[in-house]
Amino acid sequence: MNLWLMGLLAAAFSALAGAGATSWWESQPAADESDELALSRDGELPDDAEDAGDRSWLTVRTLPDVDVVHPLAALDDDAIEQMVRQDPASLGSMSVGAPNGGALFNGVQLPESPLWRLADPAHAWGTRESIDWVAHAITRVNEYFPSSPVLYVGDFSAPRGGKLRPHKSHQSGRDVDIGYYYLTGEAWYKRATSKNLDRKRTWALLETLLTESRVEYVFMDRSIQPLLQEYALAQGEDPGWLSRVFEGPNNRDPIVRHRLGHATHMHVRFENPTAELTARRSYPLLQKVGLVGGAKKKRLATKPRRAPRRATPALAVASVEAAATVEPSPVPAAVEPVIEAVPTEVPPSMEE
């Protein structure tokens, strides 16, 4: 086959592949990389800096194919600016910037519940998506196993995000520390081992997060991963699917990856399609009316990640009868900026 024909076939294949890869990102013009207000998507290791990798294989196996339509997609900047001026809360949660160099706008607090216990309610603020997904996953475990002990939930973010000691991330409402289930009952910050880890409940929790929400990464100690993988295999899970979820010699891009300090809890980082794009669309307008800081230069976005083929519909915590109504944090007056200026440069990080 001559080179001209090979090139023609390659071009045709690329065109066909691109035609089927539609996503909600395409409803917006590409961000101008020179725009000082572009949202930064740093925060990962260098090889993951702008793209979490192809996650199309990690799809919800029980939901129909649906297109993700962003709530602001049909609105122009004038309409969004009117919302910003008249009712900023109506824009919903915004994950601003990077997990290790960002902020949270219109945050939502995880309510108290008989199914979970907040280790620190003052730091239990996240985006609507993150909060709903955690509540849904814990509720699902209790549907499978009604006698489950209370699960501890650690830090999400501060009410307005930003630096949260001792963490390097947890700044933009997309990170959360979640405890493990133990055979000995409820506990927080207890080292999980082969003797005390409740494999069936912890696996049910992790599997729900992976298949019924939008997880970017889970940080988990290397000693715990094989315990869950072996249990899942014994329950009939697909070995090929599991080999891509957990670390292994042939998997350079696992969802669940080792980080020191995570034998007592798992750290879940979500993708937030709605909250992240809302921030990209709204941040310059929020800055314009004084609701966010503007003294420093900000870099608020690079190219978006590749969207999975399937989308997870919004999940609510209403299934937990005893859970309090989830309300967004109040928006202060425009004269008092909610978010200080986001740093210009955020070094890549995959840390806690």
Image (tube, rainbow, N blue to C red):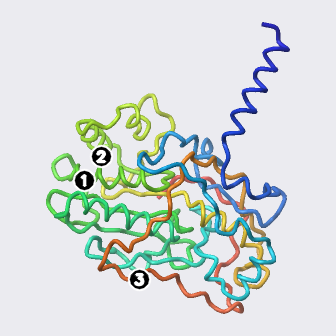
Q: Measuring from the top left, give residue 23's x and y in whole percent.
A: 66, 50
Q: Quick one: 209 or 78, which is closer to the camera?
A: 78
Where does residue 138 sit, x and y in percent of width and height? 32, 63
Q: In the rendered structure, are the residues bearing label 1 and label 2 in contact, judged by CB atoms less than 8 Å apart? A: yes
Quarter of the N terminus within the rendering = top right
* Callout 3 amino acid: Thr
Neighbour tally class for label 3: few under 14, some 14-19, many 20 plus, Cα within 10 Å: few
Instruction: State which tag comes first along the sequence, 2 or 3.
Output: 2
For disc 2, the marked residue is 224
Crowd rating for badge 2 (residues with CA inside 10 Å; few <14, some 14–19, many 20+): many
Residue bearing the label numbered 3: 325
Where on the picture, by quarter, is residue 184?
bottom left
Percent x, y of residue 282: 72, 72
Crowd around label 1: few <14 · some 14–19 · many ≥20 (10 Å)? many
In front of the other: 231 or 185 = 231
Residue bearing the label numbered 1: 192
Q: Is residue 336 left or right of residue 202?
A: right
Q: Is residue 153 left or right of residue 3?
A: left
Q: Amino acid at mark 1?
A: Ala
> What residue sits 17% from the left and 53% below the top?
196
Query: Mark 2 and mark 3: span between their CA atoms?
Result: 35 Å
